[in-house]
Image: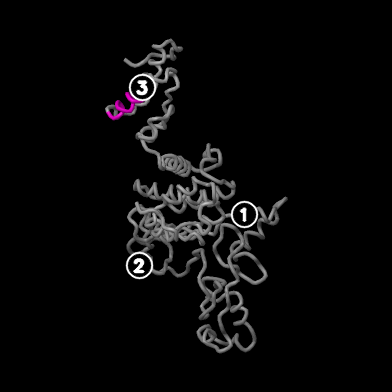
Amino acid sequence: MKTASAAALPPSGAPAGDERLGEILRALDEDFLAVLGWDWDRRVITWSRQHPVIGLPNCPVPGCPLAITVSTRPMCGGCMERWRGSSLPLEEFRLLPKRTSRGTGEAPCAVEGCERPRDSVAGRLCMAHRTQHSAAGLNVLRLEEFLVHPRVSGYASLGTCEVAACYLDRAGRQDPYCKAHLHRLYRARIEPGFDEALWRRTDKSISTTREASLRGLPDRLVAELLYGLWARTQEGKKSRPECLRPLYDRLRALQVQALEEMTDPAAHGLSREQVTMIRAWQRALRLLNMTPEAERVKDVWDMAVFGYTGRISFAPVLQEPLREAMKIWVYDDLPRRRNKNAVQYTRAVIAAGGHALGEPAPAGRGPR
C-alpha cells in the first residue's frame, strides 16, 4: 500500500487537533486515488474503464457514451431497455448506432477557446453563443460557418454551480446554478417553507455514468469514504455508482460529519447494500492502526483485530494478576480455535474464572 503524498491531501491538510483525520489521510493509498481520478479541489470520483474490480467498460453500442454498470449485462441500462422494446436479436441490436443520447453531465461549447458548457448536447453551443447565433446577420450561417466567423470568439467560464454537491459550470451570467440545478430549483421553490440556503447545502449532485460527487461533505467524512472504498476494493468487491451516488447524497442531506454518527444506518432509509457498506467501512476504520499486540493489553478487546466479531471483556475477573494471566492465556489460545464459537467459548472461560473466585456466576452453563 502506497500512502498518499502531500499532493493527494486536502489543501488545508488536517486541522490542528484532528489526529484521527490525519491518520486516515496518511492511510489513503495514492495509487488508488489516482485510479479514481481523485483531486481534493474537485472532489469527484471517476470510475475507471479498465480496473479489474471497480472498472466500468464502455457500452458496445455505437454512439452510446454510457458505461456498463452491471457486470452481468451486455450493455448499459438505457440500451438494455431499448433492446427489450425491440424485436432484434442481441448481437444484431448491438451493431446499430444510437441516434440520440440524453446522457447527463456537460460538454464544452464548440466555439474554440470558449470555457462555458454547451446549452444542450445536440446544440453544441453555450447559451451566449446560441443567442449570438440567432442574432441578425449571423442567423443565416450554418453552424460550421458560425464557428469560424471573425465576430465569434470564446467566453470565459462563469464559475461553478453554487450547489455544494455540484461540480458543473453555471449556465448563465445571472444565475448562480448549472442548468440542471436551475430546473430543480424551479420545482423546489413551490414547496412550503423552502429554504434556498439549505437546498444549496444538501441538494443532490447531477449524476453521470462514471462520476460521483463528494463535494459538500466535510474533510473527515470524505477521507473515511475514500478509505472505505479502498478497503472494499481490496476485498475484491465491486462498488456500483447507482449504489454509492444516492448514499453520498443521503449523507450530505443528513449533514453527517463522520461515519461513526451512523449508529443505525437502516433507520435513515438506506438500502440493504448501502447499510452493509457503511457497516463494513466503520469496521475498516475501527481497525485502522489497530494491532493484536496493542489490543491484548486492554481490559476490553475488539475481536475484529483478531479476525472475529464482537468484543470480549475481562472485567468479570476482578483480581488484576489473574486478569493479566487470563489475557495471556486467551491471546495464546485464540489461534487454536479458528471457528465461529471461539469468542463465545472465551467469554465463558472468563466468566467461569471470575465465578471460581467468588464472583456472581453467569447464567447458563460454562465451558466443558
Would residue 61 be found to the left or right of residue 272 on screen? left
In the rendered structure, are the residues bearing label 3 and label 1 in contact, judged by CB atoms less than 8 Å apart?
A: no
Residue 16 location (% of width, % of height):
54, 50
Numbered disc in front, either 2 or 3: 3
Q: Which mark is residue 95?
A: 2
Magenta span main SS: helix
Numbered disc in front, either 3 or 1: 3
**Residue at numbered disc 1:** 201
The amino acid type found where label 2 is placed reads Leu
Which of disc 2 and disc 1 is earlier in sequence?
2
Above or below, 210 against 152 in this view is above
Residue 111 location (% of width, % of height):
52, 80
Say which quarter of the image contains residue 126: bottom right
Say which quarter of the image contains residue 127: bottom right
**Residue at numbered disc 3:** 326
Would residue 54 be found to the left or right of residue 19 on screen? left
Above or below, 305 against 214 in this view is above
Label 3 crowd (10 A; few <14 / some 14-19 / many >=20): some
Residue farthest to the left, as pictured: 336
Would residue 136 be found to the left or right of residue 315 on screen? right
The amino acid type found where label 1 is placed reads Arg
Which of disc 1 and disc 3 is earlier in sequence?
1
The residue depicted at 62 percent of the width and 54 percent of the height is 201
- Residue segment shown in magenta: 327-335
Residue 243 visible within the image: no
The amino acid type found where label 3 is placed reads Met
Residue 292 location (% of width, % of height):
36, 35
Label 2 crowd (10 A; few <14 / some 14-19 / many >=20): few
